[in-house]
Amino acid sequence: MTTIHTILEEFRQLATSMPDLGSKFERLIKSYLLTDPTYKNLYSEVSLWNEWEYKWGSDTGIDLVARESNTGDYCAIQCKFYDPNRTLDKGDIDSFFTTSGRKFMTKEGEKSFTTRLFVSTTDKWTKNAADALDNQLIPVTHLRAQNLENSKIDWSKFSVNHPQDITLKPKNNIRPHQQTAVEKVAVSFETADRGKLIMACGTGKTFTSLKIAEKITPENSCILFLVPSISLLEQTLREWTAEANTPLHCLAVCSDDKVGKKADNEDISIHDLAFPATTNAHDLSKHISAAQDKRMVIFSTYQSIQVIADAQQQGLPEFDLIICDEAHRTTGITLDGKNEAHFVKVHDQDFIKAKKRLYMTATPRIFSAAIKAAAEERSVVIACMDNEQFFGQVFHHLTFKQAIADQLLTDYKVVIVGVDAPMIKAWIDQRELLKTDSGIETDAQTFAAHIGLMKVMQDYDLKRVISFHSRIKRAEDFAKEYEEMLHWVKAEHKPSGEIVTDYVSGKMNVADRTRKINQLKTIDDKEGMTGRMLLANARCLSEGIDVPDLDGVAFIDPRKSQVDIVQAVGRAIRKSNSKTHGIIVLPVFIGDGDNPQTELENSRYEPIWKVLDALRSHDNVLAEELDSFRTELGRGKGGSSGGVPKIVIDLPTTVGNGFVNALNVRIIEVTTVSWLFWYGLLEKYIKEYGHARVPAQLKYDDFNLGKWVSHQRTDKTKLDLKRIQLLETLPQWSWDVLEDQWNNGFEYLKNILKKKIMQVCRSDLNITVILWGHGYQIKELKKRNLVLKKLNNLNHYRNGRGTHLKTSGMKGLNI
């Protein structure tokens, strides 16, 4: 298979000298910049230095010069064709910086380069060289070989003899589920100015949003696309320019060198973006003014939103459409009188003016009723995704359940794999362990995580796995220890083939993390050996970032965020021909399997509860399975080792069924509400007694079922619709037993009077008196007056002596 890397290697083989090699590479880059959709509309001209009409000298450090389409500004480009293992030093780029800082004369007068582009075939830089890219008066962007590889260019059709001839891959066709989303959003925008598009991870939100923009905005529109990271900005910009039906004129806006605030978060500089970034409002306004009558798209991080607002103050027009990607990040709280966070400001029409706003996410974030109530008491404003004032209505929702059912995603299984001390002893080859200098210094839980993950990789034949960790050091240690463990574990327990281990983190530069992630793509079977890779990850693979197809993900010590967990699971369920299920691995060390109640209270099980709770909040199928299991517990049928279909519990043979049953029950207790248990208990009562009218003080199976049923009637206005519907399907369910009894008696009396007219027996009179008395017992005044009025309306039926029924009845009974 031809890739940019094989082409570069061919250049090396064919070059007659280093200058010849450099010349071939420069011509390739020229053709690339004029053809690739990302740059084709950015530059109107790209010239080799020796062909540029305003050149000075023959070898100045500048290899190419490009002219921007909208502004006519010039970009200086240097191309470094080095061995991929060579490390660039500051001295390798000094001459380029010096020369490109010079002024030069053109037909329009004296000019300066306004941007620089540095192209290299090595991603290794010394710290001094990397630091030199920051804070330059003339900003620098870095184009890497991997950027060329990820482009829309079909490198399989490239010929080294004709570098000017470059062919693009065909554009993607819109899929039916994406077309449905486009149509629903377009229709919804006819009557609304903001709304939500919720689509499961891996179903193509970015591509869908492009088609929405093309459908609902004119060709001379101005669109703002907001993302939470520079990595996602670059990825989105690349996809939109590659797949657009008409050329897009794009701008990137990044106001800070470091986007992430946390030390462990993404550490991306503006020069890591392979596209020139506008960093101030004046430049932004200048570019927009020069691009009239063209569809302009501004790609910006949320952290840079102040630049956008300032540009509107300087004349940038109202946006036709704002698209907020990973919109769950725009939720949050604002204290009364305090400034809003960058992510929340997008909701404010006075801050950013736009005709329409579209909020996209796979994981909507909703605050609990308790948090909302507490916020209201403290005068705190909450931007929550169920608040239509901020986010509008849901225009379209493609759930995990529907995406899996439509085979857009692969279904998944959660494998809880337990490891105990006897299993560790059975797996470890003590002879190999004794050969090491340090022995095993890791804790039991980490030890169990390694063995558990190995077991699942072997049992389910997982080839590409990413493990998730809350800290960079833990990810790094886990990758190293896993490789060591492979030497200690007995051969029969090891996953077959060659296993590569590595780690990736948010502290790595873009080149390093991209190289490591792309290793997952190249893990193939070689010479009869199965290729496998474990990539340990900490705070790197944020929302929306593409990774190769995975067979599974392992949660070793995950972050607590439900969104992070669901996004991670989304990596494993991308559709692939090579798998039937994505596997979610949850390893745990079982310390005391003989005492499950005490053992399951241990904090080692917290990751299991967190992951399952996060999954149920976004997967209706799993939620239904868990809720059904809880209902069965109430019926007295739950707790069997069968458990929940999507959850596989894989424990050592030394752990008995009692622990399995206890673990199943604890999973249900942690991930479901107790209401379903009581509902199941009520169903069991109905099966035995035939009705749902449980006496208020009744205990059933040692549970105060009568009191629970009474609470449901009292709290009807607080119940959600689904629970109300479930209760109303039960035989003889009543929200007000006394009122229902009265109505039944009243109907009976009406029928008696219609039949007898002039004859009322003593028992009928008894019914009359009971109804009259019950009418006064009804506590709610409005209802009481209504039932007494209904009874009085029967007074035109008289007995033979002309006495009212109620009077006759009372006298006849000596009342």
Image: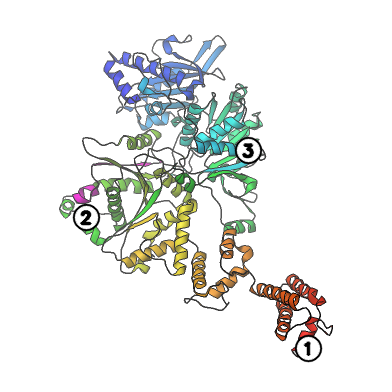
The residue to which callout 2 is attached is 427
Tell me which numbered mark, 1 or 2, is placed earlier along the sequence: 2
Q: Is residue 437 visible?
A: no
Q: Tell me if label 1 and label 3 are in contact, CB under 8 Å.
A: no
Residue under pointer 1: 811
Tell me where residue 680 appears, x and y as whole percent: 49, 67
Q: Reading the chain from its start, which is encountered first: label 1 or label 3? A: 3
At 43% from the left edge and 26% from the top edge, which residue is drawn?
152
Which image quarter is the C terminus in? bottom right
For image coordinates 76% across by 89% down, the residue present is: 812
Which element carries disc 3, helix, strand or loop? helix
Q: Position of residue 207 (x, y in %)?
A: 50, 34
> Foreground residue, 750 or 95?
750
Q: Mark 1 and mark 2: span between their CA atoms?
A: 91 Å
Near mark 3 (Cα within 10 A), the count class, few <14, some 14-19 or many ≥20, is few
Question: Which of the 4 image quarters holds residue 98?
Answer: top left
Cα–Cα gap, marks 3 and 2? 60 Å
